[in-house]
Amino acid sequence: MREPLDPEMFDPVCPSDLSPIRFGDKWGGMIIRCLEDGPRRFSELRVPLRGITAKVLTSSLRVLERDGLLVRTERPGQLRWVEYELTPVGRSLLGPMDVACAWTRAHWDELLDAREAATGALSEAG
């Protein structure tokens, strides 16, 4: 049995949209991280991805599957069992994601300053 995903694995104070480097859509990188240690069910993915709706998670999973980054496996039986797992191509993104995360950490203050300056300018213009 796998260890459950940590509900706090994504810091709510550290939004993924702050980084200008994206992997798929807004949720794609976080979904990939959730699958890093092996296959997961839909309900397991929703635990650390608290802010995502079922509809958006389904859409993001379909895009990642379409792009060849994960595979969806449905196990037949009385109780339907669906899991999502990274493909070798999806797994190959983990290294570049580590580099992107390190870059974001190194430039965190600059990114925050730029975001706050832009938000302040928009507020003053409105």
Image (tube, grey):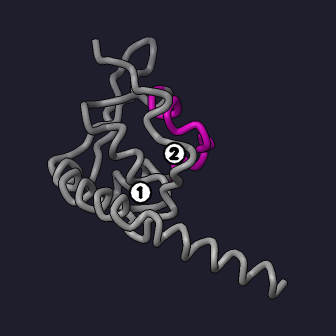
Residue sitting at x 28%, y 43%: 71
Residue sitting at x 23%, y 60%: 99
Residue 112 magenta-highlighted: no
Q: In which quarter of the image is the C terminus?
A: bottom right
Look at label 2 and name its amino acid. Thr
How many other residues sit within 10 Å of disc 2, few (<14), some (14-19) or many (≥20)? few
Q: Left of 123 or right of it: where is 85? A: left
How many other residues sit within 10 Å of disc 1, few (<14), some (14-19) or many (≥20)? some
Look at label 1 and name its amino acid. Val
Disc 1 + disc 2, Cβ < 8 Å = no
- Disc 2 is placed on an element classified as helix
Q: Is residue 85 above or below residue 103?
A: above
Q: Give the range drawn in magenta.
A: 44-59
Q: Which of 84 and 46 is in front in this view?
A: 46
Q: In this view, does 82 lie above or below 69?
A: above
Q: In which quarter of the image is the N terminus?
A: top left
Q: In this view, does 11 lie above or below 79?
A: below
Residue at numbered disc 2: 58
State the mark number for residue 63: 1
Q: Left of 58 or right of it: where is 5? A: left
Q: Nearer the viewer, residue 59 or 96?
A: 96
How far from the left and from the top, in percent, is residue 90?
A: 23, 51
- Disc 1 is placed on an element classified as helix
State the mark number for residue 26: none
Residue sitting at x 55%, y 72%: 113
Q: Left of 94 or right of it: where is 62? A: right
How far from the left and from the top, in percent, is residue 120?
A: 72, 77
In the image as oriented, which residue stretches furthest toward the right? Answer: 126
